[in-house]
Amino acid sequence: MTRKREFNPNSYYHVIVRGNNPQPIFKTKEDMFELKRAFLHVHHDYPFSMLAWCFMTNHYHLLIKAERDPLHKIMSLVNRRYSSSYSKRYGHIGRIYQKRYFAKEVDSRLGLLTVSSYIRRNPIQTKVPMVERLEDYLYSSFPLYWDESLPVPPFLNMTLLKELLPEPFEKNNTALCMYCLTFAQNAEEDPHIEDMEPPVI
């Protein structure tokens, strides 16, 4: 019997979902669009808040807090919707995810800054960086903090992290981006492989 996980409804969680094997299941810009659309669709009926996300080719990271419904329900709906779309588009039969998602509670101010930076730095932390500049990786929340003129999805909270910045950083998203670029961070997660190619444009 699978042990039911207990979640604190007042906390953000570092969530990771990986492709089975670990196969690249987010390998094109269309895949990335479908995954983001799954989050938008679920958010409409089951609201949640994110501070950061990064979609990689064989896994994705979130810093997410459920606002009303259990986190496991939100993740189940998102992953089921994307899996159905993936199977239809590629004629795939069978599961596409490695296992249940990883989730670690982040319950401190420093933890939120650390994990959010860790998530957004993923494209440059691979064995071979996927981009030279983080703002050029379009499948992450980093470009939205970098350029506040870009449209922001309704689930992204862009006000909290900047208020958590320590001195001498100013309390704005430009400073938040500099914090992310300046400090390489570590965060607990499940075993993984970080040797991958960027999505096909």
Image: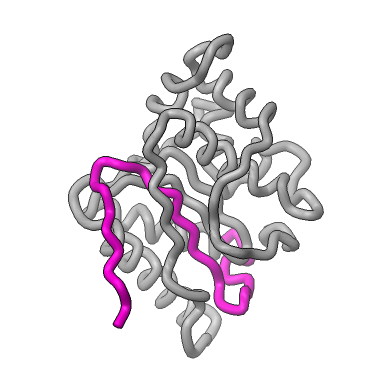
Range covered by the magenta-colored residues: 1-30
- Residue 174 in which image quadrant: top right
Of the pair 166 and 43, the residue shown nearer to us: 166
Which secondary structure type mostly characterizes the magenta part of the structure? loop
Residue 170 in the image, given as x and y percentages of width and height? 53, 11
Is 173 in the magenta?
no
- Residue 175 in which image quadrant: top right
Of the pair 64 and 45, the residue shown nearer to us: 64
Quadrant containing the C terminus is bottom right
Of the pair 69 and 186, the residue shown nearer to us: 186
Q: Is residue 153 above or below residue 38?
A: above
Quadrant containing the N terminus is bottom left
Residue drawn at x 68%, y 48% is 123
Residue 91 in the image, given as x and y percentages of width and height? 52, 87
Q: Is residue 187 above or below residue 74?
A: above
Residue drawn at x 31%, y 66% is 77
Of the pair 97 and 47, the residue shown nearer to us: 97
